[in-house]
C-alpha cells in the first residue's frame, strides 16, 4: 500500500525552473513491509568521496538492525535535475537530501515532501536550521548538517609577517588593517603568499553582507547593503592583497590549493573545509602548517558574544510517495540523522552537524587534525548562522541575478553602485512581480 499519491502541480521555480509533473507513484517498487525488516532507499552523490551518507547509515543500522538503508547515487553537479526527473517518474528514493535550501520550496510546493512535523517536534532546540523547512506551520524536512562560514588563517604566515592573529571579536575594520599589515609583512619576510584569498563565488561577498547588515532583505530588490562589502573586496584586489577575480576565474583557481599550499594567509570559507584540509594534509595534497579558524569578521562590536555568519543547512526529507508501511522507519531514520546520534557520527569524521551538544563538540574536536585552540572552539560552538538563501519562491531567480551582478562588479566591468542599481531593477521586473 502506498502512503499517499501526491497531487502534482507544475511549479515554475524561477531560475532553476524545476518543472514538476508526475505521472506515476514515487518510492521504490519493494513490496510493502509486513512487520519484518525494512529497506529504505536514500539519495546521495559522490559516495566514494563523500563519507557522510554511509556514516549516517552505518551508525543508524548499528542501533536499528531491522532497518537497512541503501543509496541511489546521483551526479553531484546535476543532482536537483536528476532527482526531479525521478520524482516525476515515480522512481525517486524513499528519502532524499535537500542539497541546497533555495530549491526546497520547489519540492515542498510540488507536494513531494511528507509532513514530518512530528519528527521536528521531538527534536528539541539543539537542531540548527530546522526552522528553514517550516511552511505555514508544517515542517517538511530536517537538517543533518549546518555549515557556517569561518575565517581560516595560517598561523605560520601570521608569525612570519609579525601580525597578531585574529580574535573572536574582530570587526571588518580590524580585518582590513590586518590584511594590510600581512601584505606588507609577508613581502618584507620574502614570502610570496598573499594576505587573503577570496574565492570566485558570490557567497564570499554577498552571504556575509546579507547576514550581517541590519535590515538587509534579499527579497526587497534593494541591494545597496552589498556596496561596502564589494568596495572592500575591490580595494584588496587593487592593493595586491589577494589574487584578482579575473586571474582566479581565468585560471580556475581552487580555493583548497590557495590556502592548502600556503599561497594565502587568510580565507573566508565554509566549515566543510575543515575536513577537506585535514584529509589533504594527511594525503600530502596540502602542505603541513599550523592553522586555525575564527569567526568571520563582524559588522561592528555589538555581535562579539555571538558572531553572525551565514550558511545553509543540508536537509533530509521523506518522499511523499513513500510506501505507507515504510513511513515509521523513515521517520525513525530522520529523527536519528538530525538528532544527537547522527550528529555525533558526523562530528567524528570532521563534518559540522546541525545538532550541537557537548558530546557532539567533544567528538568533533577529538578528530585528529582539527585545531584544538580556544578560538577555533569558539567559532565552532558560538555563532548565529543565518540562511544564505531565505526560503521563498523568488530566491533562486534573485540569486541568479545577483550572480551576474557579482561577476560584473568583481571583474570591474561595471561600477558597484551602477551594478547594484541594475540588479534591483532586474529583480523587480524579472522575479519580484510574482510576490
Image (tube, rainbow, N blue to C red):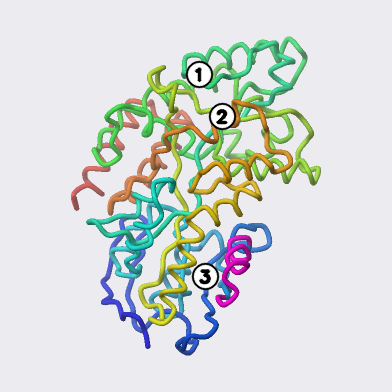
Q: Which residue is mark 1?
A: 170
Label 1 element class: loop
Percent from the top left, x then y, of residue 104? 37, 58
Choose between 383 and 423: the one closer to the eye: 383
Q: Label 2, secondary structure: give it.
A: strand
Query: In the image, is residue 423 above or below residue 227?
Result: below
Q: Position of residue 56 (x, y in %)?
A: 58, 61
In-image side of 313 versus 13 (left or right) = right
Q: Is residue 243 left or right of residue 7?
A: right
Position in image of residue 366 (x %, y %): 68, 42
Which residue is rendered at x = 54% and y = 40% of the image? 270
Is residue 59 on the magenta stretch?
Answer: yes
Q: Which mark is residue 151?
A: 2
Q: Are marks 2 and 1 in contact (CB under 8 Å)?
A: yes
Task: Choose the circle earlier in sequence order: 3 or 2.
Answer: 3
Residue 253 at least partly seen:
no
The image quarter containing residue 122 is bottom left
How busy is the neighbourhood of tag 3: few (under 14 within 10 Å), some, or many (20 plus)?
many
Q: Examine the rendered structure and indicate whether residue 245 appears above or below residue 110.
A: above
In this picture, residue 179 sits left or right of residue 215: right
Nearer-the-camera pick, 188 or 138: 138
In the image, the segment drawn in magenta is: 55-67
Of labels 3 and 1, earlier in sequence is 3
Which residue is painted at 48% across and 69% down in the image?
82
User: Which residue sits at x=39%, y=60%?
Assistant: 141
Residue on which the image places disc 3: 42
Is the residue 404 above or below the residue 263 in the image?
A: below
Nearer to me, 206 or 247 = 206
Does residue 351 show up magenta in the picture? no
Amino acid at each position: 500500500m502506498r502512503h499517499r499519491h501526491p497531487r502534482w502541480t507544475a511549479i515554475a521555480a524561477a531560475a532553476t525552473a524545476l518543472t514538476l509533473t508526475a505521472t506515476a507513484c514515487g518510492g521504490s517498487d519493494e513490496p510493502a513491509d509486513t512487520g519484518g525488516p525494512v529497506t529504505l532507499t536514500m539519495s546521495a552523490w559522490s559516495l566514494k568521496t563523500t563519507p557522510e551518507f554511509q556514516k549516517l547509515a552505518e551508525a543508524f543500522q548499528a542501533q536499528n538492525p531491522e532497518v537497512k538503508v541503501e543509496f541511489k547515487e546521483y551526479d553531484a553537479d546535476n543532482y536537483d535535475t536528476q532527482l526531479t526527473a525521478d520524482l516525476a517518474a515515480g522512481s525517486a528514493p524513499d528519502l532524499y537530501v535537500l542539497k541546497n535550501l533555495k530549491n526546497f520550496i520547489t519540492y515542498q510546493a510540488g507536494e513531494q515532501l511528507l509532513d514530518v512535523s512530528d519528527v521536528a517536534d521531538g527534536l528539541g532546540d539543539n537542531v540548527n536550521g530546522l526552522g528553514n523547512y517550516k511552511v505555514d506551520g508544517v515542517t517538511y524536512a530536517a537538517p543533518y548538517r549546518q555549515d557556517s562560514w569561518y575565517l581560516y588563517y595560517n598561523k605560520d604566515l601570521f608569525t612570519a609577517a609579525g601580525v597578531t592573529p585574529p580574535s573572536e571579536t574582530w570587526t571588518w575594520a580590524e580585518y582590513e588593517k590586518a590584511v594590510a599589515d600581512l601584505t606588507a609583512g609577508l613581502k618584507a619576510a620574502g614570502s610570496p603568499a598573499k594576505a587573503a584569498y577570496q574565492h570566485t563565488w558570490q557567497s564570499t561577498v554577498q552571504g556575509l553582507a546579507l547576514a550581517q547588515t541590519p535590515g538587509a532583505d534579499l527579497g526587497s530588490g534593494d541591494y545597496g547593503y552589498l556596496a561596502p562589502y564589494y568596495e572592500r573586496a575591490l580595494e584588496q584586489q587593487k592593493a595586491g592583497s589577494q589574487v584578482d577575480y579575473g586571474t582566479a576565474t581565468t585560471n580556475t583557481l581552487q580555493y583548497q590549493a590557495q590556502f592548502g599550499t600556503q599561497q594565502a594567509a587568510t580565507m573566508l570559507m565554509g566549515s566543510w573545509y575543515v575536513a577537506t584540509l585535514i584529509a589533504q594534509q594527511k594525503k600530502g595534497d596540502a602542505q603541513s602548517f599550523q592553522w586555525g579558524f575564527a569567526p568571520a569578521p563582524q559588522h561592528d562590536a555589538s555581535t562579539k558574544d555571538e558572531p553572525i555568519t551565514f550558511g545553509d543547512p543540508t536537509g533530509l526529507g521523506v518522499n511523499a510517495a513513500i510506501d505507507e508501511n515504510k513511513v515509521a522507519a523513515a521517520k525513525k531514520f530522520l529523527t536519528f540523522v538530525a538528532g544527537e546520534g547522527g550528529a555525533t557520527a558526523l562530528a567524528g569524521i570532521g563534518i559540522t552537524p546541525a545538532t550541537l551538544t557537548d558530546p557532539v563538540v567533544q567528538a568533533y574536536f577529538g578528530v585528529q587534525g582539527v585545531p584544538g585552540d580556544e578560538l577555533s572552539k569558539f567559532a565552532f560552538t558560538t555563532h548565529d548562522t543565518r540562511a544564505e538563501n531565505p526560503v521563498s519562491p523568488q530566491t533562486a531567480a534573485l540569486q541568479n541575478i545577483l550572480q551576474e551582478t557579482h561577476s560584473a562588479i568583481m571583474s570591474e566591468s561595471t561600477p558597484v553602485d551602477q551594478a547594484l542599481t541594475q540588479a534591483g531593477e532586474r529583480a523587480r521586473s524579472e522575479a519580484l512581480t510574482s510576490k
